[in-house]
Amino acid sequence: MSQETISELWYTRCPVPTTSGIAQHFRWLHDEFARQGIELKSIRAAGDQAVRNSHFDHSQQNSFREGGNVPPIWTRANGQDTVVVGITWVDEEQVILVRPDSDIQDVATLKGRRLGLPRHATRLVDVGRAQDLRGLLTALRLGGLERGDAQFVEVKDDTEFDLREQGQRPKRRHLVAEALLSGAVDAIYAKGAVGATLIAEHGLRPIVDINADPDPFVRVNAGTPRPITVDRKLAIEHPELVARYLAVLLSTAQWAEHHPAEVVTAIAAETGAHEQEVRRGFGDTLHRSLVPKLSDLYLTGLAAQKKFLLEEGFLAADFDYDAWIVREPLAIAQHLVKEIKLLQAA
Protein backbone atom coordinates (compact mmCIF):
# COMPACT_ATOMS: atom_id res chain seq x y z
CA MET A 1 0.00 0.00 0.00
CA SER A 2 1.50 3.33 -1.09
CA GLN A 3 1.85 6.11 1.44
CA GLU A 4 0.03 9.39 1.12
CA THR A 5 2.10 12.17 -0.45
CA ILE A 6 2.40 15.07 1.95
CA SER A 7 2.25 18.55 0.40
CA GLU A 8 1.33 20.55 3.50
CA LEU A 9 1.81 20.26 7.23
CA TRP A 10 0.29 22.23 10.08
CA TYR A 11 1.82 23.44 13.32
CA THR A 12 0.75 25.19 16.49
CA ARG A 13 2.39 26.21 19.72
CA CYS A 14 1.25 27.91 22.90
CA PRO A 15 2.07 31.58 23.59
CA VAL A 16 4.79 30.51 26.02
CA PRO A 17 8.47 29.63 25.54
CA THR A 18 8.60 26.78 23.04
CA THR A 19 11.33 25.69 20.70
CA SER A 20 8.73 25.56 17.92
CA GLY A 21 7.83 29.17 18.66
CA ILE A 22 11.42 30.34 18.21
CA ALA A 23 11.91 28.21 15.08
CA GLN A 24 8.76 29.58 13.46
CA HIS A 25 9.57 33.14 14.62
CA PHE A 26 12.71 33.07 12.46
CA ARG A 27 10.93 31.02 9.74
CA TRP A 28 13.45 28.19 10.11
CA LEU A 29 10.72 25.55 10.17
CA HIS A 30 8.97 27.02 7.13
CA ASP A 31 12.21 27.31 5.17
CA GLU A 32 13.30 23.76 5.94
CA PHE A 33 10.01 22.24 4.79
CA ALA A 34 9.85 24.52 1.75
CA ARG A 35 13.13 22.91 0.69
CA GLN A 36 11.26 19.59 0.85
CA GLY A 37 8.42 20.98 -1.28
CA ILE A 38 6.05 21.09 1.71
CA GLU A 39 4.07 24.12 2.88
CA LEU A 40 4.01 24.59 6.65
CA LYS A 41 0.83 26.34 7.83
CA SER A 42 -0.12 27.85 11.19
CA ILE A 43 -3.23 26.48 12.87
CA ARG A 44 -3.52 29.68 14.89
CA ALA A 45 -3.60 31.76 11.68
CA ALA A 46 -6.42 29.73 10.07
CA GLY A 47 -9.59 31.60 9.17
CA ASP A 48 -11.77 28.68 10.25
CA GLN A 49 -12.25 28.41 14.02
CA ALA A 50 -12.72 24.64 13.68
CA VAL A 51 -9.13 24.51 12.41
CA ARG A 52 -7.92 26.87 15.14
CA ASN A 53 -9.58 24.63 17.72
CA SER A 54 -7.12 21.94 16.71
CA HIS A 55 -4.68 23.70 19.02
CA PHE A 56 -6.78 22.19 21.81
CA ASP A 57 -8.35 19.05 20.30
CA HIS A 58 -5.76 18.05 17.65
CA SER A 59 -8.46 17.53 15.03
CA GLN A 60 -6.34 18.81 12.11
CA GLN A 61 -4.56 16.00 10.31
CA ASN A 62 -0.82 16.13 9.65
CA SER A 63 -0.21 18.60 12.45
CA PHE A 64 2.40 19.25 15.13
CA ARG A 65 1.76 20.83 18.51
CA GLU A 66 4.15 22.00 21.20
CA GLY A 67 2.91 23.65 24.36
CA GLY A 68 1.03 23.21 27.58
CA ASN A 69 0.27 19.62 28.53
CA VAL A 70 -3.42 19.83 29.48
CA PRO A 71 -4.94 19.88 25.95
CA PRO A 72 -2.79 17.04 24.53
CA ILE A 73 -3.47 14.81 27.54
CA TRP A 74 -7.18 15.64 27.39
CA THR A 75 -7.45 15.06 23.65
CA ARG A 76 -5.67 11.69 23.90
CA ALA A 77 -8.06 10.69 26.70
CA ASN A 78 -10.92 11.59 24.34
CA GLY A 79 -9.65 9.05 21.82
CA GLN A 80 -7.70 11.24 19.40
CA ASP A 81 -4.83 9.09 18.13
CA THR A 82 -1.86 11.30 18.84
CA VAL A 83 1.63 10.46 20.02
CA VAL A 84 4.33 12.27 21.99
CA VAL A 85 7.56 12.53 20.00
CA GLY A 86 9.47 14.94 22.26
CA ILE A 87 9.15 16.97 25.44
CA THR A 88 10.63 20.28 26.55
CA TRP A 89 10.87 21.46 30.14
CA VAL A 90 11.02 25.21 30.70
CA ASP A 91 10.79 26.07 34.38
CA GLU A 92 8.77 29.20 34.97
CA GLU A 93 7.89 31.40 37.89
CA GLN A 94 4.73 29.98 39.53
CA VAL A 95 3.42 32.37 42.13
CA ILE A 96 0.57 32.83 44.54
CA LEU A 97 -0.38 36.49 44.36
CA VAL A 98 -2.14 38.67 46.91
CA ARG A 99 -3.02 42.37 46.94
CA PRO A 100 -0.22 44.69 48.05
CA ASP A 101 -2.12 45.61 51.22
CA SER A 102 -3.02 42.03 52.15
CA ASP A 103 -2.10 40.66 55.58
CA ILE A 104 -1.30 37.29 53.98
CA GLN A 105 2.47 36.87 54.29
CA ASP A 106 3.09 33.24 53.34
CA VAL A 107 1.27 30.12 52.20
CA ALA A 108 0.64 28.95 55.76
CA THR A 109 -1.60 32.00 56.24
CA LEU A 110 -3.83 30.96 53.36
CA LYS A 111 -5.80 28.95 55.89
CA GLY A 112 -9.43 30.06 55.82
CA ARG A 113 -8.84 32.40 52.89
CA ARG A 114 -10.67 32.63 49.55
CA LEU A 115 -8.70 31.30 46.57
CA GLY A 116 -9.77 32.35 43.08
CA LEU A 117 -10.40 29.45 40.69
CA PRO A 118 -11.61 30.07 37.12
CA ARG A 119 -14.38 28.16 35.41
CA HIS A 120 -14.58 28.74 31.68
CA ALA A 121 -17.68 28.15 29.61
CA THR A 122 -16.01 25.91 27.05
CA ARG A 123 -16.65 22.63 25.27
CA LEU A 124 -12.87 22.24 25.26
CA VAL A 125 -10.82 21.35 28.30
CA ASP A 126 -10.68 24.13 30.90
CA VAL A 127 -6.94 24.71 30.83
CA GLY A 128 -7.02 27.69 33.16
CA ARG A 129 -8.98 25.82 35.81
CA ALA A 130 -6.68 22.79 35.67
CA GLN A 131 -3.59 24.99 35.86
CA ASP A 132 -4.80 27.18 38.73
CA LEU A 133 -6.20 24.26 40.71
CA ARG A 134 -2.90 22.40 40.65
CA GLY A 135 -0.95 25.53 41.53
CA LEU A 136 -3.19 26.39 44.46
CA LEU A 137 -3.21 22.81 45.78
CA THR A 138 0.59 22.67 45.52
CA ALA A 139 0.90 25.94 47.43
CA LEU A 140 -1.39 24.71 50.19
CA ARG A 141 0.67 21.55 50.52
CA LEU A 142 3.89 23.56 50.72
CA GLY A 143 2.31 25.53 53.57
CA GLY A 144 1.35 22.38 55.46
CA LEU A 145 -2.32 22.81 54.58
CA GLU A 146 -4.94 20.61 52.92
CA ARG A 147 -7.57 21.39 50.29
CA GLY A 148 -10.29 21.86 52.90
CA ASP A 149 -8.26 24.43 54.82
CA ALA A 150 -9.09 27.15 52.27
CA GLN A 151 -12.19 28.20 50.35
CA PHE A 152 -12.11 27.88 46.57
CA VAL A 153 -14.18 30.64 44.96
CA GLU A 154 -15.22 30.09 41.35
CA VAL A 155 -14.67 32.98 38.95
CA LYS A 156 -16.82 32.41 35.87
CA ASP A 157 -15.58 33.32 32.39
CA ASP A 158 -18.13 33.00 29.59
CA THR A 159 -15.67 33.58 26.72
CA GLU A 160 -14.71 30.57 24.62
CA PHE A 161 -11.06 29.72 23.97
CA ASP A 162 -9.89 30.89 20.53
CA LEU A 163 -6.13 31.05 20.22
CA ARG A 164 -4.89 33.14 17.30
CA GLU A 165 -1.54 34.52 16.22
CA GLN A 166 -0.26 37.60 18.00
CA GLY A 167 -1.93 40.70 16.58
CA GLN A 168 -4.96 38.72 15.37
CA ARG A 169 -6.81 38.36 18.66
CA PRO A 170 -8.21 40.78 21.23
CA LYS A 171 -6.52 40.94 24.60
CA ARG A 172 -8.24 38.52 26.96
CA ARG A 173 -9.33 39.80 30.34
CA HIS A 174 -7.76 38.13 33.36
CA LEU A 175 -10.96 37.77 35.37
CA VAL A 176 -9.32 35.94 38.27
CA ALA A 177 -6.90 38.83 38.72
CA GLU A 178 -9.82 41.24 38.52
CA ALA A 179 -11.54 39.27 41.29
CA LEU A 180 -8.41 39.60 43.42
CA LEU A 181 -8.12 43.33 42.80
CA SER A 182 -11.80 43.86 43.62
CA GLY A 183 -11.50 41.96 46.92
CA ALA A 184 -13.76 39.09 45.84
CA VAL A 185 -10.93 36.63 46.53
CA ASP A 186 -7.79 36.79 48.68
CA ALA A 187 -5.21 34.98 46.55
CA ILE A 188 -4.70 33.63 43.04
CA TYR A 189 -2.21 31.51 41.09
CA ALA A 190 -0.28 32.85 38.10
CA LYS A 191 2.74 31.70 36.13
CA GLY A 192 5.39 32.79 33.69
CA ALA A 193 5.11 36.09 31.84
CA VAL A 194 1.45 36.42 32.87
CA GLY A 195 2.39 36.49 36.54
CA ALA A 196 5.22 38.91 35.85
CA THR A 197 2.82 41.22 34.00
CA LEU A 198 0.29 41.16 36.85
CA ILE A 199 3.02 42.05 39.33
CA ALA A 200 4.35 44.85 37.14
CA GLU A 201 0.99 46.36 36.19
CA HIS A 202 -0.98 45.99 39.43
CA GLY A 203 1.63 45.74 42.16
CA LEU A 204 0.38 42.31 43.22
CA ARG A 205 2.62 40.67 45.78
CA PRO A 206 3.89 37.08 45.46
CA ILE A 207 3.94 35.11 48.71
CA VAL A 208 5.63 32.03 47.28
CA ASP A 209 7.28 30.93 44.03
CA ILE A 210 6.56 27.23 43.53
CA ASN A 211 9.30 27.18 40.91
CA ALA A 212 11.88 27.76 43.65
CA ASP A 213 11.23 24.28 45.07
CA PRO A 214 14.18 21.98 44.35
CA ASP A 215 11.91 18.99 43.61
CA PRO A 216 11.09 19.11 39.87
CA PHE A 217 7.89 17.13 40.39
CA VAL A 218 6.57 19.80 42.76
CA ARG A 219 7.01 22.22 39.85
CA VAL A 220 4.91 20.11 37.45
CA ASN A 221 1.83 21.92 36.20
CA ALA A 222 0.06 22.74 32.94
CA GLY A 223 3.18 24.37 31.51
CA THR A 224 5.81 21.99 32.82
CA PRO A 225 6.67 19.78 31.01
CA ARG A 226 5.47 20.61 27.49
CA PRO A 227 4.96 17.71 25.05
CA ILE A 228 5.43 17.82 21.29
CA THR A 229 2.59 15.81 19.77
CA VAL A 230 1.68 14.67 16.26
CA ASP A 231 -0.87 12.35 14.67
CA ARG A 232 0.15 8.73 15.16
CA LYS A 233 -0.47 8.07 11.45
CA LEU A 234 2.03 10.78 10.48
CA ALA A 235 4.62 9.50 12.97
CA ILE A 236 4.28 5.90 11.78
CA GLU A 237 3.90 6.45 8.03
CA HIS A 238 6.23 9.46 7.68
CA PRO A 239 8.74 9.28 10.52
CA GLU A 240 11.28 11.13 8.36
CA LEU A 241 9.01 14.21 8.19
CA VAL A 242 8.41 14.16 11.92
CA ALA A 243 12.14 13.69 12.42
CA ARG A 244 12.88 16.68 10.18
CA TYR A 245 10.58 18.88 12.27
CA LEU A 246 12.31 17.69 15.43
CA ALA A 247 15.74 18.17 13.86
CA VAL A 248 14.95 21.84 13.24
CA LEU A 249 13.94 22.10 16.90
CA LEU A 250 17.15 20.43 18.02
CA SER A 251 19.15 22.82 15.84
CA THR A 252 17.14 25.77 17.19
CA ALA A 253 17.91 24.65 20.75
CA GLN A 254 21.63 24.49 19.91
CA TRP A 255 21.47 28.01 18.47
CA ALA A 256 19.53 29.27 21.51
CA GLU A 257 22.26 28.24 23.94
CA HIS A 258 24.55 30.85 22.37
CA HIS A 259 21.94 33.59 21.77
CA PRO A 260 20.20 34.32 25.10
CA ALA A 261 19.22 37.88 24.21
CA GLU A 262 17.69 36.86 20.88
CA VAL A 263 15.76 34.08 22.64
CA VAL A 264 14.21 36.60 25.02
CA THR A 265 13.23 38.84 22.09
CA ALA A 266 11.61 35.93 20.24
CA ILE A 267 9.74 34.73 23.33
CA ALA A 268 8.53 38.26 24.05
CA ALA A 269 7.01 38.29 20.56
CA GLU A 270 5.49 34.85 21.13
CA THR A 271 3.96 35.72 24.50
CA GLY A 272 3.01 39.33 23.88
CA ALA A 273 4.98 40.33 26.98
CA HIS A 274 7.77 42.81 27.58
CA GLU A 275 11.29 41.44 27.57
CA GLN A 276 11.79 42.21 31.26
CA GLU A 277 8.63 40.21 32.03
CA VAL A 278 10.00 37.28 30.01
CA ARG A 279 13.25 37.44 31.96
CA ARG A 280 11.43 37.46 35.29
CA GLY A 281 8.85 34.86 34.31
CA PHE A 282 11.26 32.29 32.85
CA GLY A 283 14.61 33.02 34.43
CA ASP A 284 18.15 33.38 33.18
CA THR A 285 18.50 29.76 32.02
CA LEU A 286 15.65 29.96 29.48
CA HIS A 287 18.03 29.76 26.51
CA ARG A 288 19.43 26.48 27.83
CA SER A 289 16.02 24.85 28.44
CA LEU A 290 14.74 24.25 24.92
CA VAL A 291 16.14 20.85 23.90
CA PRO A 292 13.41 18.30 23.07
CA LYS A 293 14.01 15.07 24.97
CA LEU A 294 12.29 11.87 26.01
CA SER A 295 14.26 11.54 29.25
CA ASP A 296 13.02 9.68 32.30
CA LEU A 297 12.55 12.99 34.16
CA TYR A 298 10.45 14.54 31.41
CA LEU A 299 8.36 11.40 30.90
CA THR A 300 7.74 10.94 34.62
CA GLY A 301 6.70 14.58 34.98
CA LEU A 302 4.22 14.30 32.11
CA ALA A 303 2.82 11.06 33.55
CA ALA A 304 2.33 12.79 36.91
CA GLN A 305 0.31 15.51 35.20
CA LYS A 306 -1.88 12.91 33.48
CA LYS A 307 -2.53 11.28 36.86
CA PHE A 308 -3.53 14.64 38.37
CA LEU A 309 -5.92 15.48 35.52
CA LEU A 310 -7.53 12.04 35.75
CA GLU A 311 -7.96 12.19 39.51
CA GLU A 312 -9.43 15.70 39.35
CA GLY A 313 -12.02 14.76 36.72
CA PHE A 314 -10.62 16.64 33.74
CA LEU A 315 -10.30 13.47 31.61
CA ALA A 316 -13.11 11.38 30.15
CA ALA A 317 -11.07 8.18 30.50
CA ASP A 318 -7.61 6.85 31.19
CA PHE A 319 -5.28 5.71 28.40
CA ASP A 320 -2.09 3.72 27.90
CA TYR A 321 0.62 6.28 28.65
CA ASP A 322 3.55 4.16 27.47
CA ALA A 323 1.87 3.56 24.10
CA TRP A 324 1.47 7.33 23.72
CA ILE A 325 5.24 7.77 23.50
CA VAL A 326 6.92 7.15 20.12
CA ARG A 327 10.71 7.41 20.20
CA GLU A 328 11.77 6.68 16.60
CA PRO A 329 11.39 10.19 15.10
CA LEU A 330 13.53 11.84 17.80
CA ALA A 331 16.20 9.17 17.39
CA ILE A 332 16.28 9.85 13.64
CA ALA A 333 16.30 13.60 14.28
CA GLN A 334 19.41 13.36 16.43
CA HIS A 335 21.26 12.13 13.35
CA LEU A 336 19.47 14.38 10.87
CA VAL A 337 20.24 17.54 12.83
CA LYS A 338 23.73 17.58 11.36
CA GLU A 339 22.17 18.34 7.97
CA ILE A 340 19.95 21.18 9.22
CA LYS A 341 21.44 24.58 8.53
CA LEU A 342 19.48 27.36 10.13
CA LEU A 343 19.29 30.69 8.37
CA GLN A 344 20.45 32.50 11.47
CA ALA A 345 18.77 35.77 10.67
CA ALA A 346 18.74 36.74 14.32
Image (cartoon, rainbow, N blue to C red):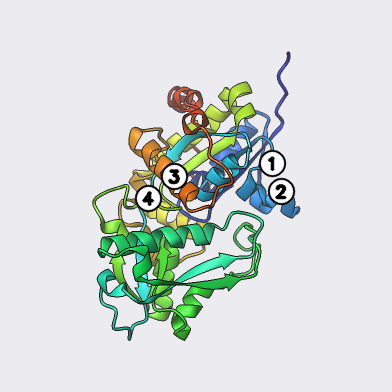
Indicate the position of residue 336 as horizontal and vertical percent values.
48, 24
Mark 4 or mark 2, whichever is nearer to me: 4
For mark 1, what is the residue?
A: 60
Q: Residue at the spot x=52%, y=61% of the render?
A: 128
Q: Is any part of residue 62 visible from this angle?
A: yes
Mark 3 belongs to which amino acid? Lys
Residues at marks 3 and 2, CA–CA distance in whole angstroms: 29 Å
For mark 2, what is the residue?
A: 51
Residue 307: give its label. 3
Mark 3 or mark 4, whichever is nearer to me: 3
Q: Residue at the spot x=72%, y=31% of the render?
A: 7
For mark 4, what is the residue?
A: 220
Residue 145: give its label. none
* CB-based contact (under 8 Å), mark 3 and mark 2: no
Residue found at the very far right of the displayed protein:
48
Precedes in sequence: disc 3 or disc 1: 1
Q: Residue at the spot x=62%, y=30% of the render?
A: 35
For numbered disc 1, what is the local secondary structure? loop
**Quick check: 189 above or below 74?**
below
Mark 4 belongs to which amino acid? Val
Left or right: where 140 falls relative to 307: left
- Mark 4 packing: few (<14 Cα in 10 Å), some, or many (20+)? many
Residues at marks 1 and 4, CA–CA distance in whole angstroms: 28 Å
Precedes in sequence: disc 1 or disc 4: 1
